[in-house]
Amino acid sequence: MKVLHINGNYLTTALHQTMIEHLDKTGIDSTIIAPTYNAESAVIKLNENVIAAQCFRKNDRFFFGYKQKKIIHYITQNVSVQDYQLIHAYTLFTDGNVAYELSKQYQIPYVVAVRNTDLNHFFKIRLNLRKRGIEILENAAAVFFLSEAYKEKLFSQYIPLDKQEGILQKSYVIPNGIDDFWFHNQYKGRNLNQAVERIDEKKLNVVCVAQITPNKNIPLLQKALGLLQEEGWNTCLTVVGKVLDEKELDIIRQDKNTEYHAPVPKEKLIDYYRAADVFAMVSHHETFGLVYAEAMSQGLPVLYTKGQGFDGQFPEGTVGYHGNPVSAEDIADRIRQVCENYATLAGNCMELTEKFGWDGICAEYKKIYGEVTK
């Protein structure tokens, strides 16, 4: 089967390239159109099946219809769309609208994913586009969500009741996968007895791997750990991530119990995970969060945001707990819960990481591709 992937974020992360490589193993013949205003900004090495379509200007993003016309024109002029059996759009509005228009023109079915920007920008702020978003969902052959939390948010806040059943029947929750590196290097040697003994002595090492932006909410996590310190805990927070906001980094560095480290390759990042007892990231908004799954592979219980991407991946209290991103007291309570159930949570993390293996995820995508193109 030949699938045309439309993915405006393809060039900015290795995530989607890894997915395509695993799809290739299933026999899917993929071509990726990556619309961009700067093809030189790619952080990945492009394969032959990737078209970096530099077809609009940076400021065109403020004019949805104008930008869309440029992308669609580029594709129709440079790609033999009629040769494909399916179109896969990786966002609802930006990529999904292109897929919808191509589907009408070439009579090819499309599937579409709903992500963070779709919910927290387009549906929430771009009120004039809500009707279009619902129309794209209604005409899609399948709708993908990375988490139950985002699926629930879409239907509870934005989809009219009379349209919900039809969209729900073709909705699937499929998480992102993590690099095979994490499976090949699972930390099966973690000494849980030592970790529990340290926690019983009120000693706790926490790691957070995240971009340094206000959205990642690291100062609130620091405040929560400060509340534990007032109770006699000896806590240390290690933060690893790219700085996108220098002012936020200045705030983070004011805490003497926090160590900041610049981004490192996964071969080094694994050492930070292994040196910690708990992984915590309570972002305000998070589509999924690969770092939670990476941390799980190293036997780390995780603390995540209530109602955001990782919430609902497992029953609450299975691999960790969700926290309120505006309450340091709640975050501190959730950390206490992790400590009280540490050995069980850590053991579950190691066993359940397989959910995020690309082989299984891509097999599910292939199955759905086949069903919607019959």
Image (cartoon, helix red, strand yellow):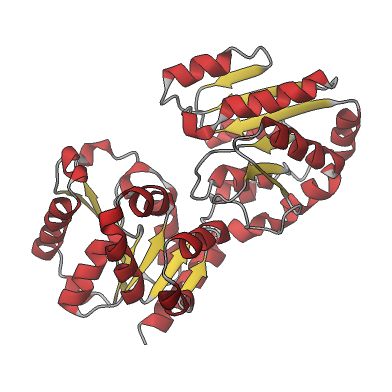
Residue 284 coordinates in the image, percent (x, y): 52, 39
When the figure is inspected, residue 72 is found, relative to residue 43, above or below; the finding is below
Which residue is at the far bottom? Answer: 374
Residue 247, by quadrant, is: top left
Q: Nearer the viewer, residue 352 or 64?
A: 64
Residue plotted at (82% across, 22% down): 233
- 88 left or right of 323 in image: left
Residue 278 coordinates in the image, percent (x, y): 72, 36
Quadrant (top left, top right, bottom left, bottom right) of the C terminus: bottom left
When the figure is inspected, residue 367 is found, relative to residue 145, above or below; the finding is below
Residue 339 coordinates in the image, percent (x, y): 82, 38
Q: Nearer the viewer, residue 29 or 145?
A: 145
Res 333 seen here: yes
When the figure is inspected, residue 153 is found, relative to residue 262, above or below; the finding is below
Residue plotted at (48% across, 29% down): 214
Residue 185 coordinates in the image, percent (x, y): 65, 45
Q: Nearer the viewer, residue 191 or 333?
A: 333
- 287 left or right of 127 in image: right
When the figure is inspected, residue 284 is found, relative to residue 120, above or below; the finding is above
